Image (cartoon, grey):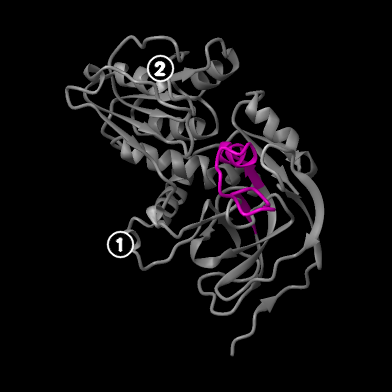
């Protein structure tokens, strides 16, 4: 029987754990996880702080494994290989995303839509994640990372991947005028992809958020305004990253006949009722659920060719609660990243 291949690692590690949704994360010393069959042990070099982490910590996603170590934008070095791991070696730089495991047998998995697997497990939610010094991950759901430092690559693992899937669902290269509602981590990555493909980006921010608006202009947006403003032209498609249900009818009112509105978030406040005329004329409304390994492979190959440049704000691991609150309050542009 093949034995796990292991570098000498510590027996314990620092971690930030969620015990009770709605309460701050707790700094703890816990055992370093042992990689099981098919898993790799990753020494975390950087872990992005995602809005989905906020939804977990704030109790808006209601079925976490408790206690749980959040974090699913993980970049680190492979420290140990469990049995039957193929494709990675000790020392490889890898990324660990939100989608952590799927059954492989259900109709969705067989159809290439593993993001809809009813038994799927998710990093930092139903599996321990990267707000720690080490994490164990299913090697099949990890990605090789190159062309970036760990800190710069971390936001690509969710903000980038979900943005890419949302962009593909909105029509990919097809829309000429693309609206983006909520100009945070995902939007600042997606805008670079869209501009590189010759698309016009219309950026909508919180009303009065001049820092985010200046950020959007700097990244090439042709029009910038508050979410309460009307763009000067019809949009061909719109992507919503802001988890605000009121923006759904607003976006529908701004896309042309035949246009698409895509909601890229995993959680959103309730969508208010709206008149059918906003959906009529073959406008369509879609949601994005999770990601597939194909998304990861395609986007991580595409990003360095543009090249996508992430803007990050680093925090020490012990300041995870501060990073989450700064994200909640919109105190920075770009993406927060924890550095253990």
Q: Which mark is residue 78?
A: none
Residue 317 place in picture, x, y as percent:
76, 45
Q: Residues within 10 Å of mark 1 (few under 14, many from 20)?
A: few
Residue 167 in which image quadrant? top left
Span highlighted in magenta in the image: 47-76
Of the numbered discs 2 and 1, the one sitting upstream in the chain is: 1
Label 2: element kind: loop
Relative to residue 138, is residue 42 drawn left or right?
Answer: right
Mark 2 or mark 1, whichever is nearer to me? 1
Residue 12 place in picture, x, y as percent:
81, 63
Relative to residue 90, is residue 262 drawn left or right?
Answer: left
Per the model, the C-alpha gap separating discs 2 and 1 is: 42 Å
Residue drawn 58% across and 46% down? 153
| Above-or-below relation of 157 to 201 | below
Residue drawn 28% across and 26% down? 176
Q: Which residue is mark 2?
A: 222
Residue 23 in which image quadrant? top right
Q: Which residue is mark 1?
A: 107
Quarter of the N terminus within the rendering? bottom right
Query: Relative to the observer, which residue lies in front, 89 or 20?
Result: 20
Residue 9 part of the magenta-drawn span? no
Residue drawn 70% across and 75% down? 6
Residue drawn 50% across and 38% down? 308
Query: Relative to the observer, which residue lies in front, 87 or 225?
Result: 225
| Above-or-below relation of 269 to 10 | above
Residue 60 place in picture, x, y as percent:
56, 37
């Amino acid at each position: 029987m093949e034995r796990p291949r292991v570098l000498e690692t510590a027996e314990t590690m620092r971690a930030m754990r969620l015990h009770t949704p709605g309460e701050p994360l707790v700094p703890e010393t816990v055992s370093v996880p042992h990689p099981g069959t098919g898993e790799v042990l990753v020494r975390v070099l950087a872990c992005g702080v995602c809005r989905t982490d906020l939804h977990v910590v704030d109790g808006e996603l209601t079925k976490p494994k408790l206690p749980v170590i959040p974090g699913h934008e993980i970049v680190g070095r492979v420290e140990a290989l469990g049995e039957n791991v193929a494709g990675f070696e000790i020392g490889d730089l890898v990324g660990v995303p939100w989608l952590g495991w799927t059954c492989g047998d259900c109709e969705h998995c067989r159809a290439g839509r593993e993001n809809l697997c009813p038994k799927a497990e998710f990093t930092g939610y139903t599996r321990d994640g990267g707000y720690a010094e080490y994490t164990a991950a299913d090697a099949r759901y990890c990605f090789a990372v190159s062309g970036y430092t760990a800190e710069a690559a971390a936001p690509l693992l969710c903000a980038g991947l979900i943005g890419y899937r949302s962009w593909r669902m909105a029509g990919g290269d097809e829309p000429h005028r693309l609206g983006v509602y909520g100009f945070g981590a995902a939007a600042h990555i997606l805008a670079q992809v869209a501009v590189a493909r010759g698309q016009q980006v219309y950026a909508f921010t919180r009303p009065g958020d001049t820092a985010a608006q200046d950020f959007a202009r700097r990244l090439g947006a042709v029009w910038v305004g508050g979410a309460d403003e009307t763009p000067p032209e019809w949009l061909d498609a719109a992507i919503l990253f802001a988890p605000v249900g009121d923006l759904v009818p607003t976006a529908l009112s701004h896309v042309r006949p035949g246009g698409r509105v895509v909601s890229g978030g995993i959680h959103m406040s309730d969508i208010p009722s709206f008149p059918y005329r906003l959906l009529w004329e073959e406008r369509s409304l879609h949601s994005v659920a999770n990601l597939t390994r194909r998304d990861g492979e395609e986007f991580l190959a595409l990003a360095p060719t543009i090249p996508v440049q992430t803007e990050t704000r680093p925090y020490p691991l012990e300041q995870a609660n501060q990073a989450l609150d700064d994200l909640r309050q919109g105190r920075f542009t770009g993406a927060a990243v924890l550095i253990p």
